[in-house]
Image (cartoon, coloured by chain):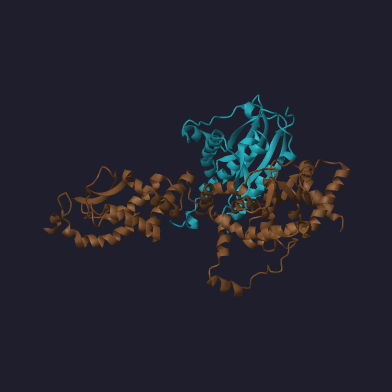
Amino acid sequence: MTTLTRQDLNFGQVVADLLCEFLEVAVHLILFVREVYPSGIFTKRQKYNVPVQMSCHPELNQYIQDTLHCVKPLIEKNDAEKVAVVIMDKEQHPVERFVFEISQPPLLSVSSDTLLTHVEQLLRAFLLKISVCDAVLNSNPPGCSFTVLVHTREAATRNMEKVQVIKDFPWIVADEQEVHMPEPRLVPLKTMTSDIVKMQLYVEERAQKT
Amino acid sequence: MDELYLDNIDEYVNDHNKIVTYKWLSLTLGVHVNTAKQMLFHYLDHKRKESSAPLHATYLVTGKLVENGNTCHKVSVVREEQLEDFKSKMSLTVSVHVYSVQKAALKDSGPLYIVDYDAVKDNLNSCSRYSAIKCADAVPVSPADVRRASDAPDPHQNKATSVNGHGNLTSKPASKLPPKGIMGMFASKAAPKNQDPGKEIKVEQKEDTTGDVSKSKPAAKSNPLSNFFGSQATKRSEKTMKEEVTSSSSVEMKPATSPPEKKVKETQPKEAKVKETQPKEAKQEARRCPASDSEEEMVDKKKRRRIKKPQSDSSDNDDVIPDSPKQQEMRKLPPTPERLLKEKIVSQPNECKRRKRRRVMKSRTFMDEEGCMVTEKGYESESYSESEDHTQSSKPANVPAKAVMSKREDEKKAQKKMSATTNKGTKQASIMGFFQKK
C-alpha cells in the first residue's frame, strides 16, 4: 500500500468525498427530523462516532446515493455553490429548504488536521443542529416529498447535460415553481470554517405552510 | 449559589437552541454534577412558573423493576411525558433527576449522546473531575509502572484499543466483561443505598476501566451483549425513547464506516467502498493462509496432500495453497481465518465435489526486449472440478509470478530447478529435453 504524501493529496477529491458522505447523512437526518417519511423506516446507524438515523428503504437510499454521486464532480471542481434539500407539499410547491452553502476557504491548505478530526467535530455539530432544528421551524403539512437542487456557478450544468454521470439518472434544470418560495423566512442553523472547506447551513421556510 | 446560572442556562437553551445535559453543564460551568442537576431542576421550575416558551426535559430514572419474574436494576432516560408512567412501573425508585433540558422535542436519544460526546472529548483528561463517582483504587499509573507493564503485554490495553477503533464484534463482548464484573459487584450491594452517586460511580467506573472516549450511554447499552454471559442481577440500561441496541447496529455499520474512515486518512478516492473491503479481506485471507502456521492449517494441508499424493508428488504444495484461498472465496465466509479453517475441516468429506484450481502447463508467446518472439511454457492456474481430472501435470519449468503465491514459488523454484531433469512422470511429453540441448 503506497502512502500518500501531502503533495499527492488531491484536494478536490478529498473535499468532495467528505462532503458527499456528510450530505448523505444530513439528507437522511433531515428526512427523519422533518418527518417527511414515517419514522419506522429509519434505523440507528453510526457516523463520525455518533448515532444517526438512516433509512432502510432501498430505493430511497439508492436515490440519495445517485443524487450525491452526480453532485460529487461538481463539488470537486468547486462548481457547486449550494446544495439544497427542498421539502415540497402535495402541490409541488416548496415548503422549506435546507440550504448547504459550500465554498472554498480563503486559505486552502493541508493543515495539522491530517486526520480530519477537527472537521469531523464540526460536522458532528451540524448533525446536532439539524436534530434540534424543529424547535425553530414550524411543522410541515402532511404528505410532503423532497428533492435535491444544486445551484451551480456559471455554466457547469452544460457539462452535466453532456455527460450523464449515472445512466438513467438525468438532471434537469429546475422549474421556476419548484425554486421560488414566496416570502421565505431565513433561519440560520450552523456555519463552519475549516482549512479545507467552508460550509453554511440555513433553512428557508415559507411563511405559511398549510 | 448565585443566580447567574439561571441566565446562563437560559442563554444556552433559548438563544443558542442547545441541548443542555447535566454532564455538559457541569463541564462547561465547572461545577459538580449534582450541582448541575440541581441547577437544571431549578431552571426548569423557574421557567415553568413563568410559563414562557415551551421547554422539554428528559429525566434519568434509576430503580428496581420486576420483569418476567426477575428483579433487575434499571437505569433509563425517559421523556418528561413518560416519567410518571415509568415511575409507577418500578417496584422501587431509587433516584430521579433531570437529565437534559432543551427547546426541541427530541425524536430520539441520539442528540443527547452527541452533546455529551463532544463535551467529554474536549475534557478527556479530566472528564471525571466533577463526577460523583470516586474509587480510591483508581489512581493514575506512574510512568515507572507503565514501563513495567509494557514489558508484560497488558490484556486490558488490548481490550481498550479494540473498543476504541473499529474493533471486531468478537472482541467487543470480551472488552465489556470487566465493566460487567464491576457492575455485578455494585448491583449485589444493597440497592437502597444506591443513590445518584452510586449510579454515577458505576457509569464513570466503566469509563475509567475502558479508558477511552466511549461514553456511559454506549457502555451501558452494550449490556445487552453481556447478557449473553447470563446473570440474573445484571443491570440493564435502556433508553425508552428508542429500543434499538446501538452497539449491535453500530457494529454492523463498522464494516461500512471503516472504509470511509480509511479513505479520509489515506485519501483513496473510490466509490465502491464496501466492495473494496471485501476483495481486500479476501486477499488478506489468501496471504494469511500460506503464511500462517496454525496447527489446524497444517493438519488441513497434510490431509490434502494425502489425497493428492497418488496423482502428483511435489507440486501439491502449489496446488494446496491456491486451493485454499479460492475455496474461501467461493464459499464467501466471514473474514476470520480461524473460522474458515474450522469449516474446512468440517467439510473435508465433501471436497471431491468442489471446483478447484490447478496449475496447468500452458504456453505463452510474446515479444521480448530484443524484439524476438519467445514462446514460454509455464504453469498457470485454472479452475476445474476434481471429479473431471485425475491426471495432473507436475513439475513446472517456468513459474509465472503471482502475488498470492509468490512466497511458495520462491521456495519451490529451487526444488524445481534441481529436479526438473528427473521429471518423467507426466503424460505430456516433457519439454526439458529442449532446454538441455543447449
User: Residue B234 at x, y = what percent?
Assistant: 67, 54
Instruction: Report the side of B119 relative to B162 (left or right).
Output: right
For this orientation, the residue located farthest to the right is B49
Residue B300, by quadrant, is: bottom left
Query: What color was chain A assigned in the picture?
Result: cyan
Q: Residue furthest top?
A: A91
Confirm whether residue A104 shows in the render. Answer: no
In the image, residue B315 lies at what x, y percent?
26, 55
Is B371 on the left-hand or right-hand side of A13? left
Q: B140 and B78: which one is in front?
A: B78
Residue sitting farthest toward the front: B69
Image side of residue A16 versus residue B426, left or right: right
| Res. B240 visible in picture | yes
Using the image as rendered, state which of residue B357 and residue A81 is in the foreground.
B357
Instruction: From the rendered image, report the letter of the chain displayed in brown.
Output: B
Total marks shown come to 0
